Every structure is written in C-alpha cells, then in structure tokens.
Amino acid sequence: MEMFVALKVIWAVLLGVLLTGLAVMVGMDMGVGSMLRFVGRNDAERRVALNIIGPHWDGNQVWFILGGGAIFAAFPTLYATSFSVFYVVMILLLFSMIMRPVAFEYRSKVPGDKWRGTWDWAFLISGALPMIIYGAAFGNVMEGVGFHYSWTGQYFQDESFLSYLLNPFAVMCGVLSLALSLYQGGTMLMLRGEEPIYGRARGFAIGGALVAALLFAAGGFWIAHLNGYAFSAPVDPNMPPTPLTGQSVVVQPGAWMNNYHRYPVLWVLPALGLLGMLGGAAMAALRKPIIGWWLGAIAWIGVIFTTGASMFPFLMPSSSNPDQSLTVWNATGSEYNLGWMLFFALLFTPIIIAYTSWCFYVMRGKVRIGDITKNTHGY
Amino acid sequence: MGKIFKLLGLALVLALGIGLAVVAGDYGPWYFAWLVGTTMIVLIAAAGAVLFDTQEAATSGEA
Amino acid sequence: MPLIDPSVVDLSRMQFALTALYHFLFVPLTLGMTFILAAMETVYVITGKAIYKEMTQFWGKLFGINFAIGVATGLTMEFEFGTNWSMFSHFVGDVFGTPLAIEGLMAFFMESTFVGLMFFGWDRLSKPGHLAITYLTALGSNLSALWILIANGFMQNPQGASFDPVTMRMQFTSFLGLVFSPDAQAKFVHTSIAGFVAGAMFIMGISAFYLLRRQHVALAARSFRMAALFGVISSMAVVTLGDALGRLDYLVQPTKIAAIEGLWQDSNAHSTVAAAPWLLFALPNDATQSNSFEIGVPYLLTPLVTHSENQVIPGLITQERMAGPRILDGIKAVNALQAFGARHDAADLAAFQASEGNMGYGFLAQRNAPNQDLKLITPANQDAIVAQTERDIVPNVFVTFWSFRLMMFLGFYFVALFAFASYYSLRNELMKHPWLLKATMWSIPLPIMATEFGWITAEAGRQPWSVFGWLPTFQAASSHPVGYMIFSLIGFALLYSSFIAAELYLMFKFARLGPQPHHDAPEEPGMSPMFARAAE
C-alpha cells in the first residue's frame, strides 16, 4: 500500500478515535449537565454533582476543540463543507457550548435562587442540545447532504436547513446520543457521589443505557432500508485529495450494509455497542459504576465505529451531486501534512493520557456535601 | 535510589532545556528571547517581593 | 456559479471581527496573569509566607472569572473558520489547520487539564507540586497563543506552503518554514508580552484601589510591587517587538506599512528620504487618497520603519500603479487554472504556472469583472476593471493609521506608568503619590484596548487579503444566505452581551470584596518550606 493511502486510512481511524474520545469525555459532562436539575433537588446536592466533574470538564472539553482542529487539518474540505452546510445547527451547538464554561465558573459565585436557577437551566440546555446535535449530525451525514462544488472548490448548499433539522432518522440518532451521555454521566456521578445523588444517578444510567440499546438496534434495521452510497466504478485510493474529479457514485437502498456483507467480521462492532449498553445497564443495577463507566466507553466505540465501518470510505455523501461526495480518499490533507500531524498525535497522545489520568487520580474519592460548604475554591 | 531518580530526572530536564534553547536560538531568535525574557520577568517580579519583605523587616526593626 | 453576495462577505467579516475582538478582551489577562500567579506562588514556596498563598488564591479567583469566558469564546473562533470561511478553510486548511490541531494537542489540553488542578488541587498536592501545576498552566496558555499566532503568521506572510493546481489549494511543504516564519515569531512574542502588560496592569490597578482605601495593605502593597516590576520589563519588550513587526511589514506587507504610516506618496516625494516626516497626527481620506491634515516629525520615518537612512518606502499610490501588470497577469493565471481544472490539459497547466505568482491578483479582479466572471473581460472593458482593482489593494488607511497610533501611544504610556510605579514602589513611597495610584487604577482597561487596536492594525491592514497575496477576503467566505448571518449575529449579540454583564458584575463584586480570610489555620514558617508536604 502506498504511504499516502496508509496515511489516509490511519487518519480515518484517528477521526473515529477523536469522535469517540469526544463522545465519551464531553458526553459524560454533558450528561451530568442535563440531569443536574433532577439528580440534585437542592442547591447543595447540585453543587456536589458539579464538583464531581468540576476539576475535569475543562480538560475534557479539549476533546471537542481538538476534534475541530484535527478535522480542519486532516480533512480540510470536510471541515469547510460540513460546518458551513450545517450552519444553523452548528451555530446552535456553539451557542449552547459556550454557555457551559461560563455556567461552571459563575453559577456558585453568587448566592440566590434566581441566579443559580438560571445557570442550572443553562446546564440543561448546554448539556442536552449539543449531544442531540452531535448524534443528529451522524444521522444526517448517513442520509446524505445536498451540496456541490464550483471549480474553485467552494461548496454550494442545495437544500434548506429544515431538511436536516427535521429529519426523523437524524432525530433518532440525536436521542441515542443523548441517552448514551446520560448513561455515561450517571456512572460518573455514582463513582464519586453518595446517596441520594448516587441512587438518582443510577436510575439515569440504567434508563439511558436501555434506551440507547433500543434505539441502536432500531437504527440498525432502519439503515438496512435507507439509501446508501456506493462507487459505480473503481476508485484510486491514492488520488489527489479533491472532490472535484475522479469518482462516480450511485445511490442504492441498503448500500450502507455492503461492507458488512463483504466482511462479516465487522459485526463485532455493533455487538460491542450492544454489549456496552446492556452490560452497562446491568452493572449500574449491580452498583458497579467503574465497570459501568468503561462499558459506556465501549458502547460509544461500538456505535461510532459501527457507523464508520458501514460508510467507509464515505465521509459525507452528497445527495444532490453524488459524484462529489466526500470520502476518505478525496477529502484529506496532503501527504506531508498528514505525516506531520501523525507525528504530533503519536508524540502527544501518550503524554495527554498520562496527565489526564494523573489528574483524575489526584482528584479521586467521594465528594461530600460537607466538602462543598467548607471549600472556598470549588464550584 | 529515589535520590538517583530525582537527579536523573533533573538532568533530563536540564538536557531538554539546553536542547530547546539551542534549537530556538538557531532557528527562532524571537522564540529564544521569549523563553529567556519570560523567565527573567518572573524572577525579577519574585525578587521584588522578597525585597519588599526585607525592607519591611528593616523598617519594623528600626521602629 | 451563483454570485458572491458582498453583503454576506461584509456580515461574515463583521461577525468574525466582533467575536475575535470579544474573545481578545479575555485572552490577554489569561496570558499575563498566569505567569504573575506563578511568580507569587514561587515566592510562597520559597519563603513559606502565607500572605503569598493568599495572594495567589485571591488573584487566582479573579483569573478564573476571566478564564471561563476566554475559553468559551475561544470555541467560537475554532469553529468560525469552517462555519463562515469555507473557501478559506478549503484553500489553506492543509497548512493553516495544522497549527490549530497541534495547539489542541500540545497546549490546550495542558492548560485546561492543569487549570482544574490549579483551582481544586490546593489541598491534594505538595507545595512544589502545586507550583509546577501553576507553571504548566501558564506555559500551556502561552503555547496556545504560540500556535494560534503561527497560523495567523501564515495569513500575513504565507511561508511553508505552495499552491497545488490539481487540488486547488495551498499545500503544506515545510514545517520549519511555517513554525519559524519571522512573522509568526515576532507576532507571538509581541502578543504574549502584551498579555503580560495587561495582566500586570490589572493586578496593579486593583492593588492601587486597595492602597487608596487603605484596605488589605499587606496583600496590595506586595501585589503592586510584583506587578509593577513585571509590567515595566514587559512594556519595554512590547514596544521593542512592535518595532520588529513594523520592520517586517515593511519587508513583506508594503501596503500595510504604508497604510499604518498614512503614506500615499513615496517617502521621498516631498523631501529627501532621510528627512521624511513621521506623522504624529493626520486625517487620511480614503476617497481622495490623500491626508486632509497632517503634523509630522521630520527625520523620523525612514530610520523608524526601514532601520536605515536611505531606503525609500513606496507610497500607496505607487503600489497601486505597480499592481496593474500583476492584475493583468493574474487574470491570465486564473483563466488558465479554470481551463486546467475542466480539461486537465498540459498546455493550460504551463500557462497557469507561468503566471502562478500573480494568481491572487486575478482573484482580486473577479469582484470587478462583469458577472464576477474573469472570462468576460475583453480588451474593451479591461482597463476600467484593472484600474478599479488597483485601488482595491489598499486597506482602509484611516482605520489602520489610527488603530496603530492609538496602540502605540498607549504602549509608551504604559512604559512611563510602570516605570514610575516601580520606582515609587521600590522606595515604598506609593502612599505619598495618590495621583499615581489613581492613574494606575483608571488604566486597568487600557492595555486590553491596546491589544484590540493591535488586532485591528494587523488584520484591517492585511485587507483586501485573507491570505496575503493569495486569497482575497471577498472569495474566502461561505456562500450563506443573508438570513443565516442575521440569525447568528443576533444570537452572538444577545449571548455575548449577557456574558459581559455577568463578568463585570462578578469582577467588581469580588474585587470590591477583596481577599477573604481562609478557613485554614495560619501556618508556621517551617524549617525548610520548600519540602514541606502540603498538609495545611
């Protein structure tokens, strides 16, 4: 295999890793944010929940920023097109995301029910909305998006934003994503919280995991009948990365199952997803939040890589001009760039994992209501 | 044993520092200036605080 | 191909400028305060005196209020390239996106992970351990700035990439060329140190407020001393680096330096090169391409900008005339490129490559071509289009001239203020000079304003280019309908104004409140505080 093709495939896998890391780490905090008003019935309880993720939310959020940066660099055309085509939801995502850091830092700085109550609503919005949009983006991409390119490489949108806002399959994917984040956040609150937060979080974890399992299975059947995309002529994976020329694509119902028919071993991925969700629900029920948390991560790996394996090598198919669909072969950066990016990813990922784990280790242990009222530099 | 590791760690940090300074000095004179300058600014600010404490001790000693 | 709507481009520019300027209200304090916090904590760890821990925690609290919005609004910046500048992202993503991704990996992770420990880890880490965390947070936030400014340096002076006619974009060719670009270097140091000045002024100003009211004197006098010394060196360094940047602009962005200096005619047009005046005050008029009124200091301009006595600085009108042939050649380049894209013919490629260096000027002419189509340029309308495009290469001179001057005057004011402040603080005579304390207190917002003017100088002066010489801003925006832009602008306006209200409310509240006594018992100065475990 040529070096460039290898780099393209590696970056496609890394894209999956990044999207998974983002989903697990940011999703956990978003889950806590969404259930904050319900697991904490008074101010002290809510502060406990916030302080459980307090030392980590900022570091976790970098997954989100890194995701944006890595797509920008490794898949410039994908970044340029997807962010612009989904403008309305991207801006909504941004609005809800930027509320969150401010909510963390400001909520508990001032006493008063009105002030804190307002920020608690901000947590609910900035937790639930981004997760729904995140999942819905996957759903929309799988269905194909209406866009084409002019000769300069500038994109043009061919459908109204309403078509991706009100797409039923995408909405289902969004709810799946929200359910997984509630499950992940629930296990985290069980890990470092005590009763009564523990019990309520346990309910959310079990419920989230079961709903996710149901929707994931339903989604699988739906996909089998959905329009998929496939190459109608062989494509050179080593092609220069541009969507303007070089491929012909057809729309076929059920094409998203082609990879599974060709390589049955891929069925491991959806199985992993279901195992994570059902096993996670069981572990939460058995009060084993650590295993539950890790099973939540496995569930995300299953869901995202199931999607990726089903679409590969497509990244964002175009429903209005399928020949200009974005794929792993035609949407990446240059070989030189992918090489340098890989070097930095290999250099820094172990370091990041090391200090992130160390940070969780330092802040380990239960957060109690007493700690919150005594400590002046918490949330 | 612990001491040896500490010394080795320190030696590694120093070696990295020198390596970084050589590369920065060669290719990026302004980057080098930032490294040296920021260190200096922080140390001078810290020295100013220590001087403050000394001055305060001297005045309260006279009084 | 649908036409580019100029009002969408303008609204996109407005949104980017507003969100960037807003983001940068918070960044300088982060860059500077982290290092001052680190200096304070260093003194605490070395001397073991509790007052320095109190200082670190008190200023740390104000830092946190500021940091949160800095992080939040930074998210917008990372996404806006994709949401609003799709052609830019496509055109340079291969080289411009890389520093942003590395920023995430190397700097942002570090800063964000450790800032959590900095606030929450006081009771869980040893003293040197916590100090190391504070330094890592400071280093991380400044490394963030480094990678962002490397990316910005590429827009000012594209180095380390070349245009590829097959993929229709700039492709990354030299990592070292990108990272060690002189523009990136000087910009990073200038911006980071400008943040140091802002942080120092903030701490010094609030300390002055306490000193004036004789409150928290032990904390305020020490903080004032540290911030004054921190600021006096930083403010001098900022001026030095500003000069370096000006000289760089003279070499690689002649339109920007001419706009900064309000130079319509060549520098030797009215007097000798050596005697050319540096304008202290002028009213540049972009419509007539001349200054309505000017007061200059003779003999200053040439040595200041060129660091020599005899190099001529070309005026904007000369530069417009020199651009004419480049525009004509650029039109040929773009037409050849389009033909090559359609047919992949070697002759088209050869024709493109002969004029490749002027491609950007061809794109620039597109705006003035009939139907925005360069192929519709005929010998009959060619001269009018070229003449129109020539004038397009000039940035808004009034804005560039004045934002630069305001920044520069403020810079010199900071040097003077910090010098007085350091002098009287070192002599412990601050209380005898309430005018100085008052001036310091009222100067808190000025360094932040100066950094905003700096951004305007750099980015307004870069126009009409988005990537200097290669991609005009007009071409760079996403092809949105106007409605999208109105939707997002209204949202940003509502959200951002409520944030700033909350931030100012909290800042004033906690600054007025001052440091609060802690629950921990006052600690004994131990025998060797360096190695005492933090059990307090």
Image: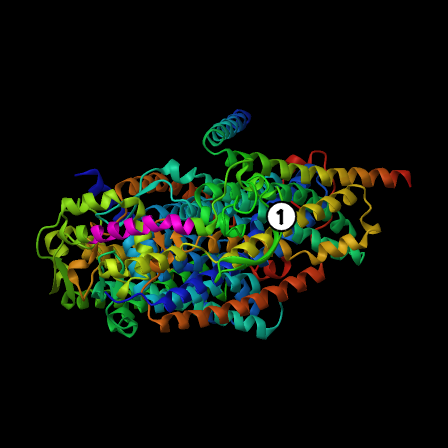
Q: Name the secondary structure under disc 1.
A: helix
Q: Residue at x 41, y 52 (%)?
A: C320
Q: Mark 1 — residue?
A: C197
Find residue A53 and report its horizontal and vertical position in percent: 48, 57
- Residue at mark 1: chain: C
Question: In the rendered view of the protein, which quadrant contains the N terminus of chain C?
Answer: bottom left
Find residue B38 and report its horizontal and vertical position in percent: 59, 38
Q: Residue at x 30, y 59 (%)?
A: C366
Residue lying furthest right: B63
Tally of numbered discs: 1
> Does C494 sit above or below residue C458?
below
Q: Is residue C307 magenta?
A: no
Q: Predominant secondary structure in magenta?
A: helix
Image quadrant where residue A327 sits: bottom left
- The three-letter amino acid code for the residue at tag 1 is Val
Label 1 neighbourhood size at 10 Å, few (<14), some (14-19), many (20+)? many
Please state the extent of the stretch shown in magenta in the rendering.
C319-338
Q: Is residue A298 left or right of residue A42?
A: left
Q: Is residue C321 magenta?
A: yes
Find residue C171 and report its horizontal and vertical position in percent: 29, 44
Instruction: Name the foreground residue: A91 vs A205.
Output: A91
Instruction: Name the foreground residue: C404 vs C84.
Output: C404
